Image: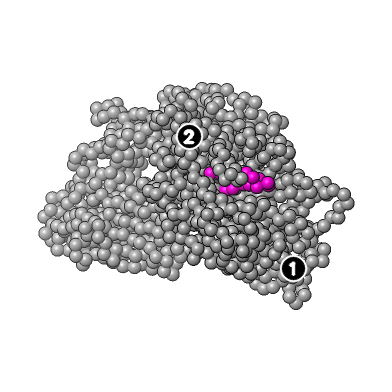
Amino acid sequence: MKNKYLLRSLLPIAALFHGAISGQTLIHYWNFNNNTSVAAITAPTSTLLNGSITAVATGTGNTDTFIDFAGGTGQNFNIDNLNARNGDVSGTHLRYNYPINGNVKFNLPTTGYNNVVVKFTTRRSGSGAGNQNWSYSIDGTTFVPYQTIISQDANPQLITFDFSAVTGVANNPNFKLKVEFSAGAGGTVGNNRFDNFTVDATTVGGIDTTPPTVNYLPANNVSNASTTVNPTITFNENVRLIDNSAITSANVQNLVELRLNNAAGITVPFTTTFANNTITVIPTNGLVPNQVYYMALKPNLVEDMSDNAVTATTSTTFTTAGTTISLDKTFVKINENAGTLSFKINVNNPANATVNLVVKPSPFSTANTSDFTFSNQTINLTPSTTNYTVNIPIIDDTLEEQMAEYFVLSLENPLGATISGDASSTVYIVDNDKAAPLASNQIQLNYIGSFDPSGNSTSSTEIVVHDPATQRLFTISSLTDVFDIINFANPLSPSVISTVNMLPYGGITSIAVKNGIIAVASPNGTNAQGNGSVVFFDINGNFLKQLSVGVLPDMITFSPDGTKVMTANEGEPNDAYTVDPEGSISIIDIPSLTVAGIQALTQTNVATLSFTQFNGQETVLAASGVRKVKSTSTFAQDLEPEYIAITSDSQKAWVSCQENNAVIEVNLATKTLVNIWGLGKKDMSLPGNGFDASDNNGEILIANWPVKTYYNPDAMASYKVGSTNYIVTANEGDEKDLGGFSERTTVGANGYGLDSTVFPNSSVLKASHNLGRFRVTNVNGNTDSDAEFEEIHALGARSFSIFNADTKQIAYDSGDQFERYIATNHPLIFNADNEANGAKARSRAKGPEPEGVTLGTINGQTFAFITLERTGGVMVYNVTDPNNVTFTDYKHSRSTSAFGGDNGPEGITFIPSSNTTTGKAYIIVANEISGTLSMYEVAASPTLSIGEVKTEKATFNIFPNPVNKGNTLYFNRAEGYELYDMSGKLLEKEKNALTIDTSRLNSGVYLIKTSEGEVKRVIVK
């Protein structure tokens, strides 16, 4: 300041040279060296006019677009440290991941300045976007293309944008820059990086008369300042003392004051440092939590290099954050034999404080003191406590318990501190005593291959039936509205005989065949809520007759004696739910099951049974578990028949109404409805009824929860034991989820409130790693018609069941066996979806989703074959004695190395050995997603046979074939093999193998010779 008056006399002369010599002021500057957070790294190092940076962010995952504030290191930015100002050392830089999906905006006001020049350094990663497309805005909204920078995968390059001649940029409070990205010579992933971003400009008057800007951190009125970060005072330009001497760490303490509460408060002892135009204030005893501080720069002591002094008192008053306590993890999994759980609690801004750690009893927890050792305790914290660990012994007992039990730990009653985040943690203990279901292998499924009727993977396959007289399979595709007639005389080499287009008749939903007559269920092709039809064909697919039935016939079947055809007419509403036709059942009398007999049928042979007689009974029926879903529909409209099971004597039928959890009994002799009854609910809180409820906690945890599930079966089958009728159900679950009405919600949804009296553990249940993402219905469970739910009701029991059709009581349910078996033996497809690989994708919904069921009798024993629509494959159970059901086998044919194989099982049919050309029994599965048929031989063990047994080796096969190079080639059973190329050269051999890795093979044709002498040709594509 001592030369101030001399300089004033020289101002007119200096003005003549100001632009030519230096003349520019650094008005915005980012060195990106504070990488503690996104806010910190995008905060200006200095700015005269409140510059800022914003960037598009889609998340922080591996494929998201975002500023990776901690990842801006290395990459040779330190070699030249280009464009650094104020002697700043090289530090971190701005890293923008997956930039091609986002943009970065720089808010750069130029008020009072012209001759604007922008500089920065930049580079990209090898796979990062190659083009940076820069544009500018002078109104803050509309951007004008400016320049494309070719970003290099090399050392950072210095970029200069000179806006001196661009109209509108100077003296503009709304000036902005935006950079967007395109692949160019780079890629579509990776990152682009920036460092030392500056904006220099000349003051409009030509002379720097602006004093330094003072910025405080923490800023004024901040109420949660960290106690571990020292306060700072930063200047936007180079500064010195008023006497023109340098500011140093030794003298800077005299420029600052730090007090408690306000300007008149008690002085706080501190030391200081000075670097990069920043004063760092270091309290001798640290900052205290929950304390108000006043920090100020004393006036008339600091000036810039143009003698512009800070003459006014500037200050900040801020409050430090209080002590907060948080759980290190709110979700923990530990094995029963792990010994000890180290449970960690984190402390921020520590001080003297206490908090209770409490174990919550039932209903919060299903585990108890026989599973772990812990007593509630008070945790004492001190100013040096940054974390606290509680060791909890886990008891490794020998009891066979639910696969996963859990207990809840809760932080409660803090004194001198507050709890941050979720106060409770769910700890799962995984049992090691109860083994997964063990297959008896009384019969075994031997996969012999897959067959795609379309030949090109362009169709779906939902239903398959078999005609023994002609050895033909009949399959439908509702995707292409056709049915295929397939030659199955050689099960290892099926072929399509012909394809029948059902579009002229209205489409196709189901198919049945008997005695050379094909019956097809067809919806109304012009009005989905209008009556559908049954279309008859001869065994070669020649049209015979079309008869009208109810709305949307969804399933069709012949009675065992061939005298009737039945359809379950679903009567679904339109998507807007403005038209809701009644569900119904149609029965067609067949006096003569011949071509001539079918041609002679008329509409008088059709009886469609209405459900109006059940209207008004829904309240009474609800007690047995019957659901009426849409309150504004009549009960007859709400009922949606799905599947039919008929007794072997053709006298009685049962029809499932899936969404309604109901079964309707039909007297076929009189063609009348006998009654309707509900299947009840399954209590998922009982041992053996566990399920994996979350799709995002990364662990398979089959646990009990306070949930009641409706069985909601799709397919059914019936059989008789003695004089008692039984129904076997595949408990898929289905809800009404339409544009005009949906009952689907989740436990964690804001609108799904849980009654606090029944569910004091509501917040625990609603956690996403517990039940929060689990799908439920909002139609049922609110038992007192208030705003909250007293019961949690879900759809689909994830099992198969056997019901006594005479007493209407459940005789057997498979509980959680499906999930437990697959979790242990096939974890890669555990609750996987049928449209992609990946475990647990369907855990939040209906799990493996049992879909189809068929029964087969082998050597006097009755077996149930159940398809799993999502997971894939077939479960097999011996159901000969409904009171002593045994798990027999499980096989699937989906690929796990890459998505492929047979996916989305729907219909299933059993072909007894007496009805085949090979003398072997078969299971054929129709797969909706892959559009394929899965074909299995059924091999009986000697223990099931009567008399002398001749053991036969199961047919050997390989799949998929052709196989894409790099994917796994599977054997349907373990076998030794030798692999040859077509020149006869032996490439490899192995004993007792199940797979071949094709990644080491070139594309081409190879021969596999088994140890039993069989030869298979395989094509590697």
The span shown in magenta is 643-657
Q: Nearer the viewer, residue 174 or 827?
A: 827
Residue 542 in view (yes/no): yes
Percent of width and height locating residue 458? 54, 65
Percent of width and height locating residue 249? 34, 42
Q: Nearer the viewer, residue 405 or 64?
A: 405
Q: The residue tagged with tag 2: helix, strand or loop? A: loop
Residue under pointer 1: 1016
**Count of numbered marks:** 2
Query: Residue 814 vs residue 121: left or right?
Result: right
Q: Nearer the viewer, residue 657 or 275?
A: 657
Which residue does the image show at 30% across and 45% down from the upper left?
234
> What amino acid does circle 2 point to?
Gln
Which residue does the image show at 59% across and 59% down from the upper left?
519
Residue 1006 within the segment the image draws in magenta:
no
Residue found at the very far right of the displayed protein: 948
Q: The residue tagged with tag 1: helix, strand or loop? A: strand
Q: Nearer the viewer, mark 1 or mark 2?
A: 2
Query: Residue 881 vs residue 325: left or right?
Result: right
Q: Quadrant of the C terminus?
A: bottom right
- Classed neighbour count for the residue bearing mark 2: other residues with Cα under 10 Å, few (<14), some (14–19), many (≥20): few
Which residue does the image show at 44% across and 54% down from the upper left?
530
Residue under pointer 2: 617
